[in-house]
Structures are given as C-alpha cells and as structure tokens.
Amino acid sequence: MITLYDYLPSGNGYKVRLLLTQLGVSFKRVELDITKGETRTKEFLAKFPNGRIPAVEFDDGRLLFESNAICWYLADGTAMIPADRFERARMMQWLCFEQYSHEPYIAVARLLAMHPLLQDPRRALNDMIVQRGYDALGVMEDHLKSHEWFAASHYTIADIALFAYTHVADEGGFELVKFPSIRRWLDGVRSRPKFIPITKA
Amino acid sequence: MITLYDYLPSGNGYKVRLLLTQLGVSFKRVELDITKGETRTKEFLAKFPNGRIPAVEFDDGRLLFESNAICWYLADGTAMIPADRFERARMMQWLCFEQYSHEPYIAVARLLAMHPLLQDPRRALNDMIVQRGYDALGVMEDHLKSHEWFAASHYTIADIALFAYTHVADEGGFELVKFPSIRRWLDGVRSRPKFIPITKA
C-alpha cells in the first residue's frame, strides 16, 4: 500500500489525497505537522531531503516528492492525463503555473493568515503577495471564460492542482466574487465523482 | 519555424534555447526585455496572459508558456525524457523542485544583484533567499553524491532545468566551492554535444 506523508491543512497534500481517492487507490496517511518541524527530522530528511510534504513511499521502497510529480505518476495511463502530446504539454504548463505563479501567493497568504504568530519574513511582502495572487486568479479567469477545464476538454490533474488552493483562497483574504468563471469551475470540480473536501483525512 | 519569446540573461529562456539547439531544431528568437515591461504589453498578454518569457508560438498558431512545460513538449519522444514511468516521475519531481525550491532563491538573488537599482520588495527577504538557495544546493549535492544525473542514468531535461540557474549561481552571490558533486555535474552538462553558453543568442 502507498504511504502518503501528509499535513491535513496543506493544499499540496490535498491534491494527492483527492487524486488517490478519485482513482480508487488505497493509501495510508502519515500526518506530519509542518509548523512543528516534523518534516525536518533526521528520519524524514533521510528519505526526502527536501523536507516537505506531500511525499510518497511505495511498498518496494521507492520514494517520490513534489505534489504535482506524485499526481502525474499516479494518474499516468488514466483519463486524468491527456493522451495527446500537446494537451499533456498544456497540462504541464498549468502545473508549472500553479507552483510558480499561484501557490507562492495564494497558499502563502493563507498560511500566514492561519498562523498569525508564525514568524515569517514573507509577511513584509504582503502587498506583493496580494497583487500577484490576484494576477494569478486573473490568468485563471481569463482562461476559464472560454474553457471548461484547464488542460483539455475534460478534467485532468491540472484542475486538481489549481483547485487545491483556489477553493480556499478566501482563507488567505482573496475574494472570488469578481471571478465568476473560476467559481463555475470550482463547482465543476466539487461535482466530480468521489470528490472529498480538504478537511477529510 | 518555432518562435521563441526570450530574454538573453534569463535562465528560464536559456533552458529552451539550449534544448532546441541540442535537439537540432531551428527556431527564431524574439528578444523582450523583462526589466522594461516588454512582456506586459497588450499584444504579448493577448497571447500569453501570464506575461512571462520564455513562451513559444508554433507555425499553426499554437501557444505554450512555462519553461519546463515547453522543454517537456519539445523533448517528448527523445532520449531527453525517460521512457520508464517512474523515471519520468522523478524527472517531473526535479522540474518541480527547480521551479519551487531553487529558482525563487538562486535566480532571484542573481536578478537582484544584476539590477541593483531595480525596486523589488523581495530585497527585504535577503537572508531567507540566501538560506533557501543554499538549502536547494544542499539537496542537489546530496543527490549528486550518488548519481551522475538527476532523473535517470542519463542526461534529461531535469539536468537542463537545474543547470540553467545553478551554473550562474555565483552571479547571485552563491559560492559553489563546498559543492564538489554539483561542480562535477556542471562540467558534465558543459561537456554534452552541442552545448551553448547562456550568453549565446
């Protein structure tokens, strides 16, 4: 059985939890509190030198980290990854966008709001975080005005990756009222078979 | 012919330039100065709403952005992408690591050093940028102590992606003297057929 090292409030962990559930794959969760340094222990770092969740361990000992890489591996060969080469590239484009232009603002704003006493130098960048977070939402809204999903004509792991932090963006202070296409797409993801909320372990 | 929207000092642009050259694919470069807002014009944003280079336009009008997604697309079906499913996942893991845990520190430190008059709120995060940059180099060194390349037993686009900013990390103030395995690997990349330097348009 797959072991998923996870942290329940993490959108990155949620991507993998949601995908495994939707694929019907059994897994065991190991909860690690990132705010208490539980991903920086010698034991964890020996397996996952990057010291971050989510990370997975397979029965044969193989290890993999990075949420979007784990999702790609798990969904490979299923309809959640397009068969067409260019659609796969577009999916990859949106996965990279999520990690580089979305998560560092939308997710970080939420992390800082959820842990008001956590000392983090990124609090000094609040204006930049808010601006770039709304920039990312603007890019998504623009795409979703004329597309039902992100990478293809159907639901893929790009939708899972972008859903993870967008659907809780309000917890970081982002208001989605001006993004009707995003809200329509969020409802679309929530309506998928075997959907689970981020709070479900 | 492929049109590559590019900015010569950009390591992200260099990834695509280097790969296209090594694959022997002809392309036309359009140079855009990111420090002068040339990727934020109405014309560019109409094609690439994220407003970043590198971005590519194909003869049939198809568009793609995000350096690692472009590299994946261009190298798909070649030896630069492993055929094995798990090796592909590991390649993806390192591509994600590069964008999330490496580029925001190693590349940003270089950008800020190259443009000392550029107003950027991230200057307030200098200590964090230095620390996390060295953390990323530590993760790379750890891997390269026992592996010749990143994702497989041969050179892949994960090596191109990580090479792009690591080989100029000194321009951001990072010293590689304590990372002998990284230096050996950098020499390995420089020795690949059809290698071009970042300064080659």
Image (tube, coloured by chain):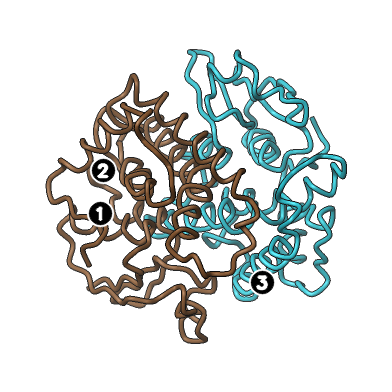
Chain colours: A brown, B cyan
Q: Residues within 10 Å of mark 2 (few under 14, many from 20)?
A: many
Asked whether the residues under the numbered discs 2 and 1 touch, taking CB atoms below 8 Å apart as contact, a structural biologist would say yes
Three-letter code, disc 1? Leu
Q: Residue at x 56, y 39 (%)?
A: A132
In terms of depth relative to the viewer, which is nearer, B86 or A36? A36
The tag on residue B138 is 3
Label 3 residue SS: helix
CA–CA distance between discs 3 and 1?
31 Å
Label 2 residue SS: loop
Instruction: Say yes or no: labels 2 and 1 on the same chain.
Output: yes
Residue wearing tag 1:
A19
> Is the residue B46 above or below the residue B107 in the image?
above
Which numbered disc flags the more N-terminal residue, 2 or 1?
1
Instruction: Say yes or no: labels 2 and 3 on the same chain.
Output: no
Q: Position of residue B123 (x, y in %)?
A: 76, 52
Residue wearing tag 2:
A80
Q: Position of residue B106 (x, y in %)?
A: 71, 56
Three-letter code, disc 2? Met
Q: Is residue B191 visible?
A: no
The tag on residue A136 is none
Q: Residue at x 47, y 86 (%)?
A: A43
The chain carrying label 1 is A
